[in-house]
Image: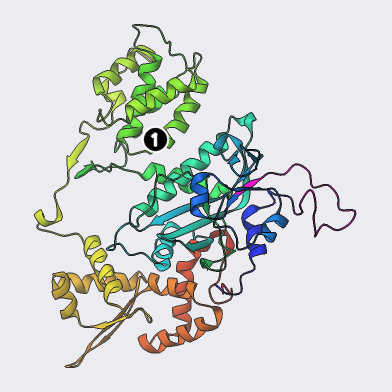
Amino acid sequence: MENIQLDSLYQLLLQGGLRTYKFKNSHLKPLNTQPEGNKGAIFAYRSKDNMIAGRGVVLTSEEAIQENQGTFTHWTPNVFRYGTYTDKNRSYTKGHSENNLKQINTFFIDFDIHTAKETISTSDILTIAIDLGFMPTMILKTAKGYQAYFVLKTPVFVTSKTAFKAVKAAKIISQNLREYFGQSLPVDLTCNHFGIARMPRTDNIEFFEPNYCYSFKEWQEWSFKQSDNKGFNRSNLTVLSGTQGKRQVDEPWFNLLLHETKFEGKKGLIGRNNVLFTLALAYFSSGYAIETCEYNLFEFNERLEQPLEEKEVIKIIRSAYSEKYQAASREYIITLCQKWVSEDLTSKDLFVRQGWYKFKKKRSERQRVHLSEWKEDLLAYLREKSDKTALYLTTTKKAIREALGIPESTLDKLLKVLKVNQEIFLKIKLGRNGGIQIAHVKDLLVALIERKKEARESYIQTLTALFGLPHTLIEETLNKLSERAAKGAQLDLFRVDTG
């Protein structure tokens, strides 16, 4: 992208984690500059091959980055306490490990295309981000796909005094974020959460909006809800409906065990280890990521009067997540609760529902298709058939019915609902040569986000003329949708220049 000042971009990403000037041999430091205090280090690499081999450079100042601008391909955007080398020639770096993290500045996601059939674009990432409610600060083009950065408003500092809880909490957020995008796009779920990423350069930045930065607290609130909303992800398996008892973690017994602290751990006794394993199975069967389970059970273990060593807790959790087990046994749960909570407890006290699972029929086997499923089909059809520049489709209802196999009455109802909910712009022309013009509002918003300020007004005027809608109505509709993504930034698409 043009007109991006890399120095300012790096300052935004690094958030004061490095010195401004080199400690020695600075060419920029003014005379009588005060010492900058204790700062950290990052690692940078001049090629992917060098990165894989561990051949890199330790950088401790923004000045050093400026001097090497354009020569690095990879770096660590999160700051470490120190960096060093393993050899006398100072070629192989050492220190980029989680237990050496000093501050977390950003989350990042790799979108990797592995086959010729897979396609992905910046627009696809932005479209999903609108639903997420958190827009990426930056999107880079890579050799195999894209990499999105989600920069924090202020960094999260890591300290040993808190047993590195910040890292554990941030890792859960990062995992939930990757899993969210991974539902629709090819996300690399295996790469290190706070490791090496692509370095932003003038030749790889596809999108950049410095206003899209969110607080760690906002991310935590979203992540908690995301973990709570996770359901089963096994093939053809869904959870019984209802506001309570949908998952084992929602059952009364789970909280009873989770808040007890007096479990004993003796050989031959159904006690502490069994409780931990049962709680871990509940997290597993309820669809939680293993990182979430670890974070919560580490805290649980710390509260116990007789806690286990952390490595033993990890071993128990790994066993629960080995997929050898489906869920915690009801009979075993009753035994544990009567042993450690109260011997008077019964199944009615411990469980909300009597059934755990039901199997969902495939869509092809059902007589009735839900309106939400027809909506997904219609929006996918719009994306495929719409003009790639204008992002609207001129067609007929008959063509849509034939393409989707949707009944006429269902299509009419769906279009009405989507229009009332301001999810589409729709214009219908009656008569022999009539037809419809239809556009997905979310796709239009993404197009606006990607356009420069000067091009937005022209685009809005085109939409106004096309759909016969008031200019202000289109602006208000698009801005209303953008508010979810802008959050604290209060971004107004028609006033902020993202060029």
Q: Which segment is the magenta one? A: 20-43
Residue 99 on image: x %, y % = 57, 34
The image quarter containing residue 11 is bottom right
Q: Tell me the element at label 1.
A: helix
| Residue 406 visible (yes or no) | no
Residue 242 included in the magenta stretch of the image: no
Outermost residue toward the bottom in this view: 432
The image quarter containing residue 227 is top left
The one nearer the camera, 60 or 237, is 60
In the figure, is residue 303 to the left or right of 238? right
Residue at horizontal 64 percent and vertical 53 percent from the top: 14
Residue 37 included in the magenta stretch of the image: yes
**Does 117 sit above or below residue 264?**
below
| Quadrant assignment for the C terminus | bottom right
Residue 322 on image: x %, y % = 30, 30
**Does 382 sit above or below residue 102?**
below
In the figure, is residue 266 to the left or right of 87? left
Residue at horizontal 61 percent and vertical 56 percent from the top: 13
In the figure, is residue 329 to the left or right of 402? right
| Quadrant assignment for the N terminus | bottom right
Residue at horizontal 51 percent and vertical 14 percent from the top: 305
Count up the numbered dots.
1
| Residue 488 visible (yes or no) | yes
Residue 361 on image: x %, y % = 14, 49
Residue on which the image places disc 1: 290
The image quarter containing residue 123 is bottom left
**Most common secondary structure along the magenta stretch:** loop
